[in-house]
Amino acid sequence: MAYKYMAEAWRQPESSFVKELMQKRVIEWRKQPAITRVDKPTRIDRARRLGYKDKPGYVVVRIRVRRGGLRKQRPKMGRRQKRMGVTKYKPAKSIRLIAEERAAKKHPNLEVLNSYWVWQDGRHKWFEVILVDKTLLPELRLGKGKGRVFRGLTSAGRKMRGLIP
């Protein structure tokens, strides 16, 4: 029952207690490194829904990623204005998928299970990524070879591939 109220509060953070709480936490988060291991998930209801369990082998990592679109470097030699192409470039990947990939690179012995949005301000977005130890949890059948996130098998990757609307 408690998870239901938590999920409701996170659905509209501006009109609940979440906004005040997170504004205080984000002040500390900005001073931390971009990739930080967390003891417990910030949004326990969301983490549990995405497959997190509080037992050995499950790791939660909070990742800070930049917000906004991409800017290309301005060409130095002749183009007409229409073909300059500096602003308004959209990356093929979502920022959430970029966060998952960074977590996978930082922790090569772990496999990305899923991720969820935690907070954002004008400059950054924070995501929490759930990672699983492959050797401790063979019952998940995560497979071998290159990680799930790099093959587009997480929910963010499947969305990028057009499999989830």
Image: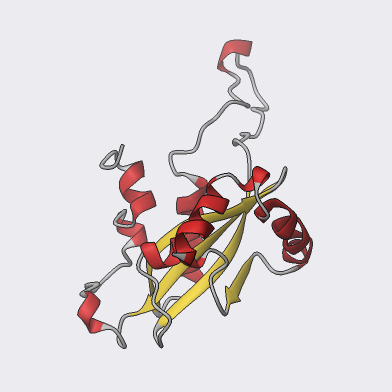
Asked whether the viewer can see residue 130, the reply is: yes
Quadrant in which residue 55 is drawn: bottom left
In the rendering, at what x and y percent does residue 91 appear?
49, 38
In the rendering, at what x and y percent does residue 71 appear?
63, 34
In the rendering, at what x and y percent does residue 22 appear?
70, 58
Figure check: 84 above or below 159? above
Asked whether the viewer can see residue 125, the reply is: no
Q: Residue at x 44, y 69 (%)?
A: 130
In the rendering, at what x and y percent does residue 97 appear?
45, 52
Q: Residue at x 36, y 60 (%)?
A: 149
Q: Residue at x 68, y 27 (%)?
A: 76
Q: Residue at x 68, y 54 (%)?
A: 17
Residue 120 is left or right of residue 89, and the answer is right
Q: Quadrant of the N terminus?
A: bottom left
Q: Nearer the viewer, residue 84 or 150?
A: 150
Quadrant in which residue 75 is drawn: top right
Q: Nearer the viewer, residue 9 or 72?
A: 9
Residue 43 is left or right of residue 23, and the answer is left
